[in-house]
Amino acid sequence: MFEHSRRSRKSQMSEINVVPYIDVMLVLLVIFMVTTPLLTQGVEVDLPEAVSEEVKDSDIEPFVLAVDRNGQIFVNEEKQPSAGEEIVRKAAVVNKRSPKTPFLVKGDRQVEYQAVMNAMVLLKQAGIPKVGLVTEPPEK
């Protein structure tokens, strides 16, 4: 009688049902595909055109100050403008953690030259040795 009960037990499946995981992954993929373009929108800066050498892509993300046409300074595509002291502090921290980080200034073509210079001075106050200016290549 004891042996008979052993044989009648159903054997357990050792396979994992992956169909629910695939469904979850597809939903997450769609969510990320929809939200990513919304996150990459930044400050609109109409860059001046100039012939210049193209920057070689590196693995290090650059520290970018964007100066809009009103003279407000934004750090790394943030939505809110940053104050001078905050910019100096952030730039100094980034430079200390990763000294090879490129520091760039994007100035709108309609902004006064003084506003772009102010952004460069803030980076110099943070101890940044080299600052690059971002331009667009001229249209042919």
Image (tube, helix red, strand yellow):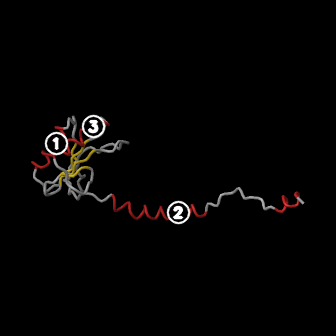
Is residue 96 shown left or right of residue 31?
left
Q: Please say if 25 is above or below 129.
A: below
Is residue 54 shown left or right of residue 86?
right
Position of residue 126 measured from the top left corner of the image (x, y, whole percent):
20, 38
Which image quarter is the N terminus in?
Answer: bottom right
Is residue 98 shown left or right of residue 92?
right
The answer to the question of whether label 2 and label 3 lie on touching residues, with beta carbons closer than 8 A, is: no
Q: Residues within 10 Å of mark 1 (few under 14, many from 20)?
A: some
Callout 1, which amino acid?
Leu
Q: Earlier in the sequence, mark 1 or mark 3?
A: 3
In this rendered view, identify the residue nearer to me: 104 or 26: 26
The answer to the question of whether label 1 and label 2 lie on touching residues, with beta carbons closer than 8 A, is: no
Callout 3, which amino acid?
Asn
Q: Residues within 10 Å of mark 2 (few under 14, many from 20)?
A: few
The residue that label 1 is drawn on is 122
Give the farthest residue toward the right: 1
In this rendered view, identify the residue nearer to me: 82 or 118: 82
In this rendered view, identify the residue nearer to me: 42 or 106: 42
Q: Please say if 111 is above or below 92.
A: below
Secondary-structure class at tag 3: helix
Position of residue 95 measured from the top left corner of the image (x, y, whole percent):
27, 37
- What is the spatial separation of the Cα atoms under label 1 and label 3, in whole angstroms? 13 Å
The residue that label 3 is drawn on is 95
Give the farthest residue toward the front: 1
Position of residue 37 measured from the top left corner of the image (x, y, whole percent):
36, 61
Position of residue 100 measured from the top left corner of the image (x, y, whole percent):
31, 36
